[in-house]
Amino acid sequence: MATYKKRGYKPKTKKEKEVVVEENSTTAEVFNTLDEGASKTEEWFVKNQNYIIGAIAVIALIVLAYLGYKKFVAEPQGKEALNEMYQAKKYFEDAANGISSDSLYTLSLNGGEGKYGMLDIISEYGGTSAANQANYYAGMAYLNLKDYQNAITYLSDFNSNDKMLDPIAKGGIGDAFAQLEQPSEALEYYEKAINANTNNFTTPIYLLKAARMAIDLGENQKASEYLNRIKSEFSTSAEASQVDVLIGKLEASL
């Protein structure tokens, strides 16, 4: 058992002197080990200082290059892409409003009046926000032109957290699969559209589409859940007026 020794305490017996010598020896050994470790670390740094400095310099250059690219290349390019997309977007909006729809959707894709179309924006300004938006417009244009495979391709390349565009894009993919008579895939994307965001506009639309697709697939329990959700959560929506008839058909089939 260790005993407490007051400061200035001097060992009296031979045994106590041996203990003190041993303690001092152990302490000295610890400090020597630490010194050796520090010396080895210092030697390693000295030996590899050129590599270390080089690595730091490379990292600094990468950071500066990224900041420079973002400031002097990406940002100006993004603004230019948005300006170039203006006419194509106008074609799309006019088509969506029913003005010579097919021809305007085609112009929105391929361009006109010497201006870029959405496909040009995607090709020329890849990686920009404008190119990402162009994927959405291109996908929806193809959907309206009944080119369902291209609609799926471009809408799948669109990434957004927008509360409206994200579910509409996923729902558009569902519509394309439905037209291609792939009901399982259509239901999957209608469900993704439902889960993307809950709102009074898109959610009841895709709940109803998911319910109809589930009925076609014989998934009546799932269909019933979606229909009842419309009835309870979105009772004032246009889709709610169709729910009771579909629930009645489901109950009759069961």
Image: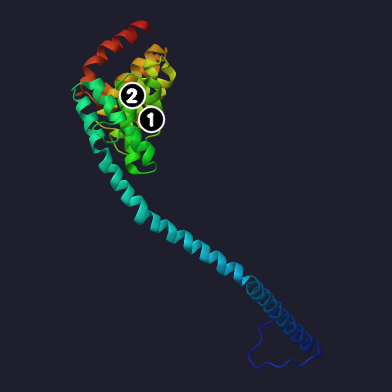
Check the picture and name the quadrant holding the N terminus: bottom right
Check disc 1 and report the residue beneath it. Answer: 154
For label 2, the crowd category at 10 Å Cα-Cα, with few meaning under 14, some 14 to 19 and many 20 or more, is many
Q: Disc 1 and disc 2: Cα gap in Å?
A: 9 Å
Q: Residue at x 61, y 72 (%)?
A: 49
Where residue 89 appears, as percent x and y from the top left, is 25, 34
Tell me, yes or no, whether the two marked residues, 1 and 2, touch with CB atoms within 8 Å: yes
Snapshot colouring: rainbow
Mark 2: amino acid: Tyr
In this rendering, is residue 121 above or below 179?
Answer: below
Callout 1: helix, strand or loop? helix
Identify whether 11 is placed above or below 82. below
Query: In the structure shown, which secondary structural element does the residue marked by tag 2 occupy?
Result: helix
As rendered, which of 58 and 188 lies closer to the eye?
Answer: 58
Say which mark, if any, is on residue 7.
none
Give residue 205's quadrant in the image. Answer: top left
Q: Amino acid at mark 1?
A: Tyr
Name the foreground residue: 87 vs 9. 87
Looking at the image, which residue sits at the far right? 14
Q: Quadrant of residue 43?
A: bottom right
Residue 40 appears left or right of 240: right
How crowded pointer 1 is (Cα within 10 Å; few <14, some 14-19, many 20+) is rated as many
Label 2, on which residue?
Answer: 142
